[in-house]
Amino acid sequence: MNRLRTLEILVGAFMAAGFLALFFLAMKVSNLSADVGGEGYRLQARFENVGSLKVRAPVTIAGVRVGRVEAIDFDQKRFEALVTLRIDPRYRQIPEDTIASIFTAGLLGEQYISLSPGGSEVNLADGGMLDHTQSALVLEQMIGQFLFKKAEEG
Amino acid sequence: MLESLARLGHLGLDALARIGRGHLLLLAILGGLASLMARPRLLLAQVYNVGVLSVLIIAVSGLFVGMVLSLQGHYVLSQFGAAESLGVMVAASLVRELGPVVTALLVAGRAGSALTAEIGLMKATEQLSGLEMMAVDPIKRILTPRFFGGLVSMPLLAALFSAVGVMGGYFVGVGLLGVDEGAFWSQMQSKIDFREDIVNGVIKSLVFGWVVTWIALFEGYDATPTSEGVSRATTRTVVHSALAVLGLDFVLTALMFGD
């Protein structure tokens, strides 16, 4: 009986350690603790060009992450990208004339959406549309424009 | 001419027969699940054999793999001025690949070979037939608990490996190389996704646990009942498990992280 008890204790300790490691991975290593999960409300924005924006990219206001990109679709009527953002329900007050811009974190970093709040008194509701947007900067286009301008100057 | 053709055919049929026997054995093992539920104590002993006894080697390897990853990752990343991404690199490679794969390889070497040798010897010394004589089904009594013991232990060991590895990477990266502690953890948390990375890693290690214990049990059960046969079966267990784990890892990675 004593031997069995030691066995049980050891196996219990092993399983506890295993689950603790999983818990550590979930809470400390992954984004589970910081994720907005299935909650939050949605905003939409149309962009001429989303560059290399990816689903799950961060959405920030003043550099603070307030949500994530939930979906990127192509609007066939207007030939624009339709981006759905999921915003943390804690951040309810986003004015309707907010500007959504796609920026790049660092020179080679990933792209994210930055919201610059406007001055309107009216806040966006769930499913609201951000009308003012600024597309991603595409490096090739910029280089092309630069070279074209240089050539024009002679 | 005909002779060599016949030999080739014999080889092919042999391989097919082995695969068939392996699957029949797996079905029989799974069929013993109900009777295992009635006697969970049998499972306990096997979780001890496969899991608890592997903790030391898993933890030590995890620690060193994490530390080496951190050292090498820092060397490359610092050349691009991205040393802060060290945490992401260490955690992603551990959780997605190294955790499940290296754990499976270590378990195949440490526990799989022992399982094969144990069952092969039981067969060679006619203990399995002895059980049958007493109207005890050796598959239900001996193989099923070992199979589920391996299946339960593998994901826990892999999680342990990854967690210890991340801590090892943290000690070297933050403690030794001077990467900023906040950036190390926050970049890791923002890039590692729970469902995409961690859950997929757990699924991988479950698949590996299934395959490694299955191969080990089948090789033992199918071994020629001589000392030479058992030694061959043990070698085959390690080789086949390693090949199966590495091959399956590619398939699983392509399915999970392919896009």
Image (spheres, rainbow, N blue to C red):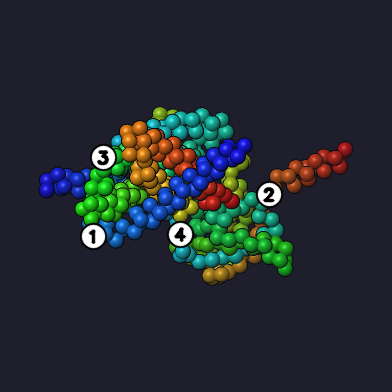
Which residue matches tag 3? Answer: B125
Which residue matches tag 4? Answer: A36
Query: Helix, strand or loop at disc 1?
Result: helix
Residue A71 rendering spot, x and y as whole percentages: 58, 61
Q: Is residue B250 left or right of residue B142?
A: right
What is the CA distance from the residue labelled 4 to the residue labelled 3?
60 Å
Q: Chain of mark 3?
A: B
Query: Helix, strand or loop at disc 4?
Result: loop
Confirm whether circles 4 and 3 share one chain.
no
Q: Evaluate if marks 1 and 3 touch, with contact meaning CB atoms under 8 Å apart.
A: no
Q: Chain of mark 1?
A: B
Residue B34, quarter of the rendered image: bottom left
Identity, as a three-letter code, of the amino acid under mark 4:
Val
Residue ID at (46%, 42%): B245
Identity, as a three-letter code, of the amino acid under mark 3:
Thr
Number of callouts in the render? 4
Query: Helix, strand or loop at disc 2?
Result: loop
Q: Is residue B201 left or right of residue A5?
A: right
